[in-house]
Structure formats: structure tokens, C-alpha cells
Amino acid sequence: MKMAIVHPWFLMKGGGEKFIDVLSNIYLDADIYALFSQDKHLSRHIKDRNIRPSLLNSVPFSYKLHRQLVPLYPFAIESFDLHDYDVIIASGGPGVMGVNPRQDAPVIYYCHTPQRSWWDLYSEHQAQLPGLTRHLFTLSTTYVRTWEYAAVQRVDHVVSNSKYIAERVWKYFRRESTVIYPPVETSMGYIGDHTDDYYLSVARLEKQKKIDLLIHACNALKRKLVIVGTGKEEQYLKSIAGPTIEFVGYVSDADLPKYFAHCRGFLFAADEDFGISPVEAQSFGRPVVAYGHGGSLETVRVDDPTGRPDTGVYFYEQTTPAVTDAILRFEAQEHKFTPTVIQEHARQFDTAVFERTMREFVDQAVNRTRELV
């Protein structure tokens, strides 16, 4: 079975790229296609694989302009010659669902999220743009949204990375989808021999991650907050940080576990489609104070109807007072959280579970297609 894996870009190292690492480890002979690719952003797992970027990758400074080239995504994706492949897995958001396979080759679209800027956040994004740019954005995204909707109708199977995303896939594409949670290396987690007096945040320092809310809350409560990560908002976040806030920047995979294992609790204010870092924190037995929306509702257990113990605390507004109140509520019941119970909850999202479930799904998809041909 000859397989192709299609991904939007290798221009950063995030959850989508970790997903490709695991997927390519399941299918060691698969060829990997991408709209854009930079060698420095290829992980050690795939840097020696057959990576085939699109023609857009040769555009000067494409790694900086990839978002401006959105209207050309359909052309780039449809230009891939995939007729030799028996099955295609398209992973990600923009563009990848539009591949052109051989008639008897099933296409599986694993949706991490419908692209927020031209689906659910379209109006907000449009309103923030100045006159001419706003008109160009409207024109290009109208075309791309129409193309993406039609493309999703052609794929054989849709997989969503959470129930939250499955709802959005139905809303925007009118396609039912199967939920297969993305892989998280929970088996690497361990219970620390002690807990230090600090809260932890691990995220790219970008506006949508809402790190500023965590900083304001910890400033007000005079709680120590350790922030792991870098990004565009770093200087701004440092400018609002008080003396109890510590920025440690980039931390290697080898050193990150000690931050998870010894934190008092993990703080998470983003509205994520799934959210890997809260699961990672729980794999070390650490409770999570999370925004109670999106993927967090599926990964952090609070007020379980079957009576299973909580693994964290929710707040329901992305405001500083809401985060502050949640931290205080967490501290009032901190003694009730059991690290081994929290760790066991996280194990359901382990990479091994994903690998087994995804392999079974792909095999079934191939078999169903063969029966129809």
C-alpha cells in the first residue's frame, strides 16, 4: 500500500508538526507533501524522508509570505501528482483537503481545525483590517472558502481531532466525522518527588494564547508563574509582568519534563481545538486550571457526571478576574487532587492509543474502498 501524507507547511514546530512525526512513524514508507517546507523546521523524525514541497515553496521569501499566498493554495495542492498512491492522508487546516487522488484511492482528511481566520473568526479578522487590505481579504477568502467546502465534499473520510472540531466540521463543511484524538507522549510523564511553589504555562507567546490573562492574575495574587515559550508577544508580555513572573524562553524536550513535574499547577487560558500542553501537564500528575471551552472540556475532567475525580478547575470567561477566581478556587481544594489519578486520565490520549486507532481506521477505509471498486 503506497501512501502519501499531505501537510500545509513545515515552517514552525507545533502540534501539527508533532502529529506528522507520529503519523510518519506509523507509515515509514509514506512520501510527505507540503505547500511550504524549510529544512531547519524539519524534525529529526522526518528530515531524511522524501519531502516534496509545492511550487509555492520556490517563491522568494515564501516562508514569510505564506499567509499572503492563500489564494494560490488550491492551485498548489491540485498540482501535486498523486496518481501513484493507494491511500492519501491529508493532515491539517488550509488547502490540504483539495488533493486529487486516483479514483480508487481513498482520501482521509484529518482536520485539526477549519482555518479560523476565514471560518469562525472571519468577521473578527475582517474587521481588524484597513480598507484595501480588508477588500482583498474578503475577495480571496470568499474564493478559498468556496473551494475548501467543495474539496471537503470530495474526500472519502473526515477525521476530527476532538468533538469540538467535529462540531465545527459539521457547521462549516456539513460532513460527519470520526473523532480520533491527536497523539500526546503521556508515557513520558512521571510523578515528581516534590512540588515547588510555582504555576506553569507552556505555549507559543502569541495573542490567541491569552498569556496576558495569566500574567495579570498572578501579578494580582503575587503568585510565581514560570512561562516556557517564545513568540511575537514576548516583549509585550515581559512589559506587563511583575516580579513574580519568570520567562525561561525555549526549553528543550529533555529539560521540559522537570518544569511539568514540579509545578503546583498548570495554567491554560487559550480556546484551543484540542490543546496538547494541558494533557502533557496531567501526564505528570499535575492539575490544570483551564478555560472551560473548546478542547479543554474534553481533556481536563471537571464535575464528571459519573463521579470520577476532577483533574483540574475551569473558568468560563477569558478575563483576568475569572482566572484569578479560578486560581483561588483551585488553591482551596488543592489537597483533593491525586497525581496518580490525574496521570491515569491523561494516558487515554497517549501516542500508542492514537497509533492503534489511526491504523485501524486507515485499514478499514482502504478495505471499504476496495469493496466498492
Image (cartoon, grey):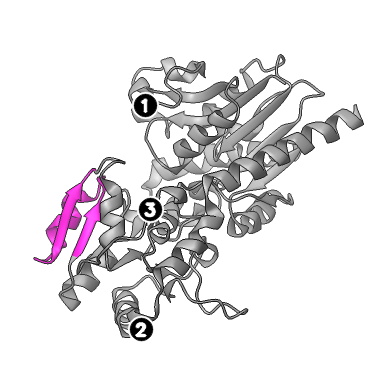
Question: Farthest residue toward the front?
Answer: 193
Report the Cα–Cα distance between label 1 and label 2.
47 Å
Q: Secondary structure at mark 1?
A: helix
From this view, report whether residue 365 is shown above or below residue 201. above
Q: Which numbered disc, 1 or 2, marks the residue that appears first in the sequence?
A: 1
Residue at horizontal 64%, vertical 35%?
A: 97
Q: Nearer the viewer, mark 1 or mark 2?
A: 2
State left or right for residue 66 relative to residue 230: right
Quadrant including the C terminus: top right
Report the Cα–Cα distance between label 3 and label 1.
23 Å
| Residue 150 visible in this rendered orientation of the protein | no
Q: Mark 1 Cα within 10 Å, few/some/many (few <14, many 20+)?
A: some
Q: Which numbered disc, 2 or 3, marks the residue that appears first in the sequence?
A: 3
Q: Secondary structure at mark 2?
A: loop
Magenta stretch encompasses residue 237: yes
Magenta stretch encompasses residue 158: no
Residue at horizontal 41%, vertical 59%?
A: 278
Closer-to-camera residue (4/55)? 4
From this view, report whether residue 136 is shown above or below residue 27. below
State left or right for residue 209 relative to residue 33: left
Q: Which residues are magenta?
A: 225-250
Kindly indicate whether the residue at mark 2 contacts the one at mark 1 (C-beta within 8 angstroms).
no
Closer-to-camera residue (132/226)? 226
Residue at horizontal 51%, vertical 70%?
A: 301
Quadrant including the N terminus: top right
Q: Mark 3 Cα within 10 Å, few/some/many (few <14, many 20+)?
A: few
Task: Identify the residue position indicated by label 1 in the image.
Answer: 63
x then y, percent, for residue 187:
46, 49
Task: Identify the residue position indicated by label 2 in the image.
Answer: 333
